[in-house]
Each structure stands twice: as C-alpha cells, then as structure tokens.
Amino acid sequence: MFEGLTERLTRSLQNLRGQGRITEDNVKDTLREVRMALLEADVALPVVREFVARVKERAVGQEVLKSLTPGQVFVKIVNDELVHIMGDANEGLNLNAQPPAVVLMAGLQGAGKTTTVAKLARHLREREKKKVLVASADVHRPAAIDQLQTLAAEVGVDFFPSRPDQDPVEIGRAAVEHARRHFHDVLLLDTAGRLHVDEAMMAEIRRLHEAVQPVETLFVVDAMTGQDAANTARAFDEALPLTGVILTKVDGDARGGAALSIRHITGKPIKFLGVGEKTDALQPFHPERIASRILGMGDVLSLVEEAQQKIDQQEAQKIASKLKKGKGFDLEDFLGQIQQMKKLGGMASLMDKLPGMHQLPDSVREQVNDKQVARLEAIILSMTPEERRRPEIIKGSRKRRIANGSGTQIQDVNRLLKQFSQMQKMMKQMNRKGGLAKMMRKFGGGRMPGLPF
C-alpha cells in the first residue's frame, strides 16, 4: 500500500534529516521533489498545490529555524500536513438514530460495493456488537441479490430477500419496516452501480434516498482509479448528500492518489479502507496512521489492534507458559505462529505496518514474502507430530519423505531445520535474560504478532 509514494517521499526527505541548518533554498529543492512525488502518485493538482504551500509556509517560519533538530521538525510538518489533507482524525459512522439506523451504499459498478456491504456488516456485528440487516436494491446486475445473500450468511448477519422485478424504492421501504419489526440496530442497503455516472442512475438512487432517509450515505470507490476516484465522488456528492467514503482495493494501490485527494476535493471524510478480498479486510481510516505509513514510519497501533482482535490469546499464553517453564519451542509451536500470522493478513501486511521496512534491500524483502511462508507451512505440515516435537530425529529418509510430501526440495527442508535451530537458540537466550517475558507482557501476555523472530 502506497509503496511508490513512500519510496519517493522518504528519498526526498532523507536529505533534510539530521541537517543542523535549514535554508529557504534547500526547503525549496526538497518541496520540488515532494511535489513530483505527489503528482506521480496521481494526487489531484489542487491538493498538491495547497499541500506544498502549507508545508513551505511552516517550514521557512520560526518553528523550524529555531529548532535544535530542524530536519526532524520538517518531516513532522510534512506528516502533520498529510494528516490535515486526509481529514485530521478518524470519523466513524454516526449511528445515533432511532433504530434501525439506515446506511445507504452508493458507487460505480466494479468498485466492490456488495462485498463492502458484507465487510461493513461484519465490522458492525463483531466490533460494535450491532444487530445488522442487509438488503439489496440492486435490481439491474444479474445475481447481485444472490451474492449479498451468500455473503450475509458468511459474515453471520440477517438478509432481507428481494427480487429483480421489484422497484428499488419498494425494496428499501420494506427492508426498513422489516428491520424495525425485528429490532435490528442497523440496516445496510446495497444499491445498483453503473459503469459511469448517468442521470437515470442518479434519479433512481435519489428516490431511494428520499424513501429510506439514511443516517449515512457512503460512496464506495476503487482506490486504484487515483484522482478519478475523487472526481467521481464529487459528482455523486452533487447528486446525493454523501456523509463519507469507503476506499476499496487499497492493498493494490501503490500510489495513494485517491486517499490524499478525496477529502480535499469532496469535503467528505474517508471512513473505511478495504484492504483485501476477505470479509474481515476492512479497516477504519485513521489519517495519522496512514500518514505515518506513507512516510515509512509504519503503523504499529493498527498492528497491535489487529493482534488483539485476531490472535488466539489462549494459544499465545500456552506458548508463553511453555517457555517460562523452560520447555522448548518446537515446530508445532512454530506452525501455530505461522497460522496466527496469516490471520493478520500475512507477511506483506505485517511488513507494511512495521517502521522502516521499505528501507530493506529487495533481496531481503523477497526472502520474507508470503510464498516463502506458505512453503515453510507446507514443509511442517508434511512432518509427523513426533517430528514436529523432536526435529533432531529428521534425517535422510525422513527429509526425502517430507520434501516429496510438501512439493519442495531436500535443501528447503534443511534450510528450515537450520533456521529453526538458530531461532530456538535465540529464544533460549532471550528467556534466560528475561527479554522474552518483557516482550510478551508488552503484547498483553501474548507475544509479538506474527513470527517470533
């Protein structure tokens, strides 16, 4: 996420870090590079102009010139202005209404609107403990209603049935009445999308909006369309009173133009980010955390939150207790660690949130990708329970069997066993010095999210 922008911006700012003195000239040179980085990231030109002007005004002022660490203060100014452009703070859904609180989802075809309805329903059920009903007023796209019904069952929320031959307004009113009678807290209403903004589409959604009177009208848009996403959001906002935006497919967006442009162009907050295909891949949008990621400083807060929600604390306590008693960390435990890490979105998601990861050489980053982790998992799964508990018994014929069973080479099995042996030694040393216990306490009695090394 935002890899291209992160690389360009951090390279531009690197020259100013650590400098004892900052002049108007070197600020000007750096801002020229920052401007190019933002434009290449497909950030809208008016946004770039305002951002650069605000940074320049603060950078050549007294707050930098009188600072003992002007380079660091300059980076902080860039961070603050990135946060400001994206909306200053997280704005959640406003569901303070007489139940059911109706949330209307709008957007173009192909933006991932129906999937986003399911993701949001899961978020509201699991994190906010709401009783959720979902309904589809999309009578134009074949199988849209069936798709939402399947997703509703997957995420464990109620589904209101509708038919393609019904009027969308009729569906909306009936869904609201059903939600009221069955004491649902929230009704999420999916609507039809089109390949482009057209008047017929807008007229239909305006009628639906008027009929159901939603407390939130969210525009769902594909982040990979860059500043076009912001322009489309503005067109929708002129036709509908939007209350916020959900950016989808952010995990595939290396540029970041949409995230940096939408708030400025539409005046509407980004409320959520879709960061993957699974139904749990929806994150509340925190401008300060995204700015931190863009500048290569990671997003440890989001990582800790995800760890608390998704990691099996009992499993973590079991490993902690085992190590405390001096019992070895075996391959069975290691397999559990790999599977826990997959719940956090895999190695790519983990590295995206850790500070400084973008500075690692490509050769190092390639060694810790999700394919390599999947290979490790396959090798361990091809072992017997006894081999996982006592890896020292794995010799010639066993190695051949494990390699054949996992579709790998004997060299891959040898490499895993060698790395695991080194890891065991490291963990024993940490345990003797008390470092491991401190690290585990920091993460609520568990352990570092992801792999233990």
Image: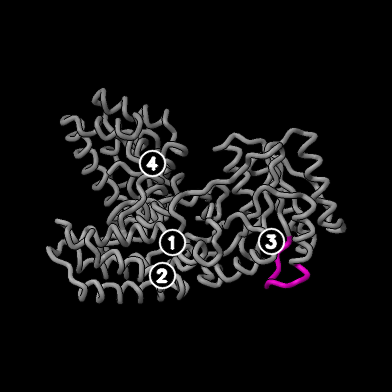
Would you name the residue on which mark 4 appears? 304
Marks 4 and 3 close (CB-CB < 8 Å): no
Sequence-wise first label, 2 or 4:
2
What is the spatial separation of the Cα atoms under label 2 and label 4, in whole angstroms?
34 Å
Q: How is the image coloured?
A: one colour
Q: Position of residue 207 (x, y in %)?
A: 79, 59
Q: Is residue 266 above or below residue 433?
A: below
Viewer can see residue 65: yes
Q: Is residue 422 above or below residue 202?
A: above
Q: Nearer the viewer, mark 2 or mark 4?
A: 2
Tag 1: Cα neighbours inside 10 Å, few (<14), some, or many (≥20)? Answer: many
Q: Quadrant of residue 45?
A: bottom left
Q: Amino acid at mark 3?
A: Leu
Marks 3 and 1 close (CB-CB < 8 Å): no
What is the spatial separation of the Cα atoms under label 4 and label 3, in whole angstroms?
37 Å
Q: Amino acid at mark 2?
A: Glu
Q: Nearer the viewer, mark 3 or mark 2?
A: 2
Q: Nearer the viewer, mark 4 or mark 3?
A: 3
Q: Nearer the viewer, mark 1 or mark 2?
A: 2
Tag 3: Cα neighbours inside 10 Å, few (<14), some, or many (≥20)? Answer: some
Q: Amino acid at mark 4?
A: Val
